[in-house]
Amino acid sequence: MSGMEWKDEQRVFFDKTAASYGVNFEQANPYLDFVLARYIGAISPRKGESILELGASGGRFTSPLLDAGARVCAMDISAKSLDYMREQLRGHSGFDRLEVLEDDVTDPQALGDRRFDALVGAHILHHVGDVGLALKTIRRYLKPGGRVVFLEPNPWNLLWYIQFTVHPGKSWRIERGIFHVWPSRVLRHFRDAGYARASIRCFGFFPPVFLNWVPGTRALESTLERLGPLSRLLTLNLFTAGNPD
């Protein structure tokens, strides 16, 4: 499949499913409460700085960036997802600091010569056909000394494959890019693209469908996280890197 076909397939799927974001986001609250603290903590958004959010979808990870006072450029290839974001965040006190852009992360002309303090994205790299190309392309939008944070499903955690297969709001065909985000491979892509200080932190054990639907999984998850030998199997990988000064 060509890069264009991959991108079009992703766009069509997320345009089609954007109408269900409201239900999905409400169901995801326990998962979000757990994940946001780690993800936003790693980004450490600061008042007045500029952040490019890639694969922003319906804005569930965008709002906390605005809460921190950052100026956010939210990019996604799905027009319907971005329409949903605008509607959801229209009443946010930081709405005037939000810019919404329908484009592709691998488009080298998408943002011209603009530069940002941080590049971030949650569950986006595995939806990109060529992760190495994407990381090389977006680095041009990062200021010297800027930082990068990406949150991705861990392909070593087999429960993701169950979720992608049985969850009514998921599609294995759309999520199959999980095979593109093996931890060692992503770290190598960061290094090859010229980033500095590339690292990974793993956390969690259960994917959203388990954490939201099965009682008691959060308490069990806290125990499992403390078991060192299981660290490779934890559910989420938090990748961080920086642009050389």
Image (cartoon, rainbow, N blue to C red):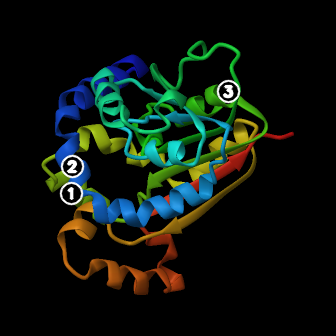
Q: Are marks 2 and 3 in contact (CB under 8 Å)?
A: no
Looking at the image, residue 220 lies above or below residue 139: below
Numbered disc 2: secondary structure:
helix
Residue highlighted by disc 3: 141
Give the side of residue 242 with respect to residue 3, left or right. right
Quarter placement of the C terminus: top right
Residue 24 marker: 2
Q: Are marks 1 and 2 in contact (CB under 8 Å)?
A: yes
- Residue 198 left/right relative to 239: right
- Lower sequence index among marks 3 and 1: 1
Q: How many neighbours does mark 3 have within 10 angstroms: few (below 14), some (14-19), or many (20 or more)?
A: many
Q: Residue at x 69, y 49 (%)?
A: 241
Res 155 quadrant in image: bottom left
Q: Position of residue 99 (x, y in %)?
A: 50, 24
Task: State which mark lies toward you, 2 or 3.
Answer: 2
> As drawn, is 226 to the left or to the right of 80?
right
* Residue 27, disc: 1
Query: What percent of the width, then of the height, locates residue 117?
Result: 70, 37
In the displayed image of the protein, which residue is found farthest to the right?
245
- The amino acid sitting under disc 1 is Gln
Query: Picture coordinates of residue 157 (x, y %)?
Result: 38, 65
Q: Position of residue 144 (x, y in %)?
A: 81, 35
Give the side of residue 188 with respect to residue 24, left or right: right
How far separated are the C-alphas under marks 3 and 1? Answer: 34 Å
For the point 37% across and 45% down, the residue is 60
Sequence order check, earlier mark of 2 and 3: 2
For the point 36% across and 59% down, which residue is it? 32
How far apart, in angstroms, are the residues tagged by discs 2 and 3? Answer: 31 Å
Tell me which residue sits at (23%, 33%) in the image.
18
- Marks 3 & 1, CB-CB < 8 Å contact: no
- The three-letter amino acid code for the residue at tag 2 is Asn
Indicate whether 3 appears above or below 34. above
